[in-house]
Amino acid sequence: MNTEIIFTAKNIAAGYKDKRILEGFSFTAEAGELLILMGPNGAGKSTVLKTITGRLPLQAGEMLLQGRDLQRMSADEKAKSIGAFFPGRITTEHMSCREMVEMGRYPYTGHFGVLGKADKSAVDEAMELTDVSSLADKDLMQLSDGQRQRVLLARAICQEPKLLVLDEPTTYLDVRYQLEFLALLRKLCRERGIAAVLSVHEVELAYRAADRLLCIKDGRMEAFGKPEEVLKDDLLQKLFDINPSRLHEEGHTELEQYAATLGRRG
Amino acid sequence: MGNRILQKEKGSDGRTRVFFWCLLLLLFLFALMLTNLCIGSVDIPFARVMCILTGTPWFGSGWDNDFVSTVIWKIRFPRAVAAVFLGGALALSGYLLQTFFHNPIAGPFVLGISSGAKLCVALTMILMARYMLVLPSAVLILAAFLGAMISMGFVLLLSMRVERMSLLIVAGIMIGYICSAITDFVVTFAEDAQIVNLHNWTRGSFSGMNAENDMVIMLLTVLCFLGILFLAKPISAYQLGEEYASSLGVNVRGLRVCLILLSSLLAAVVTAYAGPVSFVGIAVPQLVKQLVRTARPLALIPMCFLGGAIFCLGCDLIARCVFAPTELSISTVTAVFGAPVVIAVMLRRQKERL
């Protein structure tokens, strides 16, 4: 496997005008790997991702994309090397899946955005890789959440990025589709030498899917490394302010109580 | 037959389908234009209209030649041309606003932009009436543009605070009512001589156009049309939302400014010459999207223009003829056909959400 370093963050800080949200983040993302950001709500996962995509200004530190300063790259260069997934459902009007995927070719087409032969074959290929070719003419709004995420992934792939930044791509999905989506993402990143940086809400899912984990709490890096090295009980306690053993007991009794009330009603 | 053609092309990228519809709408527009020239308070036979348009002499019976020629060239033709271009302008303005606000029921009329333009034009007319009775086009358009921009400013301010899109529309309608109320107030207390021209105009009508008006309308509308066509690519990305657009390399702020200026200018041109015309801006883009079922701006922009032209030309024909010799205001007719479309769109959205 290729181990070229795609993305490097050196001691970065970011946030909104009068409020600094993150500080002291240093990490790298290698070609073909999934780097998953993990942590409680409001810890700063989204802020990290927004800083990489340029939605939030970098307040200190340095970000490098394949050795080049990200701040100095033009919008067009960035679009050709960073693909993005934003949180929340996308809403479109009468947009077919194919039209959505074609949007990924945006940085490569001419002034009127008309697709050439190479663009069309890139679109076809991306749709085949994500298994959405059969949905090409369907309205995006008529798809299931799982199908829609695959179409969005096809869009990101045919943008031919080096780095994929995904903010909560699995939020609206059932467990089965969450696993399926992350497996597909992993396969695509491996095959194409893409580095993916993403945030995932579920601890279990993050642990399973990540090549490396970046744990965040209160805008600081708590840990960074391989999941099995990083994710120990005490880290989870620290991250989420919980006591795993007690949670287990309490959860258990609460469930039993709930079952009992249900039984009484039934 | 048409159905079979459409079926065949479903598999392709739909370009032929769009082309097919464009051609059909163009033909329809042409036919409607001729109908508009024939029908009116004086009915002129089709053959005679053709003779006058092509400049060949007419040897049949009927009205005096000079008279018919005047009716066509001085009255009906300028009016029809105005309806075509102003209708197209309204539909384009609505399309841009719907794109801008990501809201299928946005349009220059519901957002109060037309009413703002109306207010400004009315004020200018009354203030300037002392010096001249008929205002030059440039002054009218500038006043309308200023009014449109002021209303747009309010809508933008509200859109930053309002989360739900339906509330934005309500706010826009309220801005419209406020502007209309002020207009009415000003008109009530103005002297009769100052508002001679105003009364007919505030109701909305394509009547009273001349060749000079038409030239200005055509020039501005065509320029805006070309400008929008050049923005087709960033508009396509903007449909996905600001975040996606900027991640694809779109200069979102620049695009937003362009969308606002172009849509306000188009709405202003319409209001300056025809007064406020309701529902065309919302209904036509929706109907066109339903027709071609694509999100490609490069297809939708010309289709919206054609659709708006046909819609307004048709409505103007009805406004002129159904209760002749009494003429209806254009908004009366456009509302009857446009409002149900808006209701249908809202119902469909509701269903999709469930």
Image (cartoon, grey):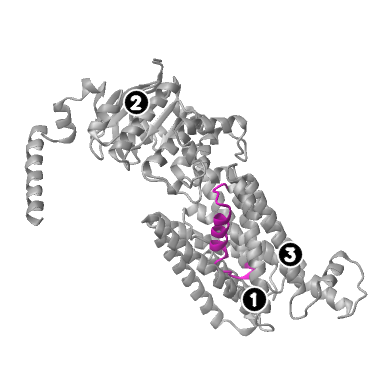
Q: Upstream in the sequence, badge 1 or badge 3?
A: 3
Please name the amino acid that badge 2 sits on: Leu
Q: Nearer the viewer, mark 1 or mark 3?
A: 3
Say which element carries label 1: helix
**Local crowd at mark 3 within 10 Å, few (<14), some, or many (≥20)?**
few
Q: Which mark is residue B319?
A: 1
The residue closer to the viewer here, A135 or A97, is A135
Residue B353 x/y as whole percent: 38, 55
Protein chain holding label 1: B
Does residue B280 show up magenta in the picture?
yes
Residue B274 location, quadrant: bottom right
Please name the amino acid that badge 3 sits on: Ala
Please name the amino acid that badge 1 sits on: Ala
Q: Which mark is residue A34?
A: 2
In this picture, which residue range is highlighted in magenta? B272-296
Residue annotated with mark 3: B31
Say which element carries label 2: strand
Cα–Cα gap, marks 2 and 1: 64 Å
Do badges 1 and 3 share one subunit?
yes
